[in-house]
Amino acid sequence: MNQDDLKRMVGKAALDYVEPDSVIGVGTGSTVNCFIEALVHSRMRIESAVSSSEATTKLLQAAGIRVVDLNQTGGLDVYIDGADEFDQHRRLIKGGGGALTREKIVAAASRKFVCIADESKQVGVLGKFPLPVEVIPLARSLVARKMVALGGQPQWRENFTSDNGNWILDIHNLDLVDPVAMEKAINNLPGVVTCGLFAIRPADLVLIATNEGIRIS
Ligand code: 5RP
């Protein structure tokens, strides 16, 4: 199976965690797009969805799924989203698609966070994938210098503006042996909106697509 087949397999597997007629949170990225496709194909009726990005909103609306604002819903039962990396404790790096801030908000509002990924995303220690950090544009250089002090090598994601009107720094070679401490340290820097570490609130479940089928972590 190639990576697209694995993404389709795990997108479909996530349907088992969606209750008919519920309000769900939907993440962003190519794996989530497979989930949306599977949801539409299943003909399961859901009440509505809270979206984590403009791109996902467009897809959901094109599929006839009602998208609602998080301020109009209470807590969500389930949030389905992909990841750029995950470890054995279900801690994640996210934000390769630049939607990390809204993703973190919707994850925080959800009782269950089901992460869907293929096995190529599993790592022993997070950090091979450069860590995305969303910054207020004015603070880009300041945050970049602070990230160097924390041991990383920041790279500005040029020609990219987030859905929130902010910029992204991708931080290479950070030591993420203690991802909770690093998430707190980065999020505490003035000018940082949030970083793509999901360690303080990890996923509750990772569905891992492998050539042998779905593994659950
Ligand atoms: C977007 C994300 C995505 O979940 C992450 O980049 C994985 O994407 P894909 O499913 O396309 O590999 O965090 O901000």
Image (cartoon, rainbow, N blue to C red):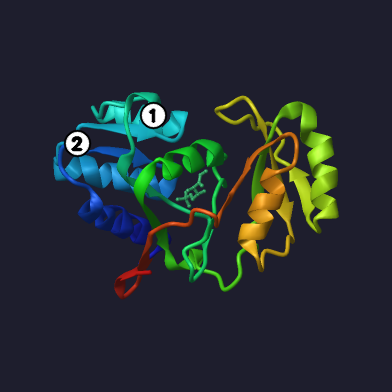
What residue appears at the point 79 percent right and 49 percent down from the top-left corner? 147
Answer with left or right where residue 61 lies relative to residue 154.
left
At label 1, the amino acid type is Leu
Quadrant containing the N terminus in the rendered view: bottom left
Check the image and report above or below for 87 versus 40.
below
The spot of residue 136 in percent (x, y) is 70, 30
Q: Quadrant of residue 20?
A: top left
User: On the image, numbered disc 2 is attached to which residue?
Assistant: 46
Density class for disc 2 (Cα within 10 Å; few <14, some 14-19, many ≥20) is: some
Residue 137: x %, y % from top left: 74, 28
| Label drawn at residue 158 | none
Q: Does residue 173 sit above or below 82 in this rendering?
A: below
- Closer mark to the observer between disc 2 and disc 1: 1
- Label 2: which secondary element: loop
What residue is shown with label 1? 70
Ligand 1 neighbours mark 1 (CB distance < 8 Å): no
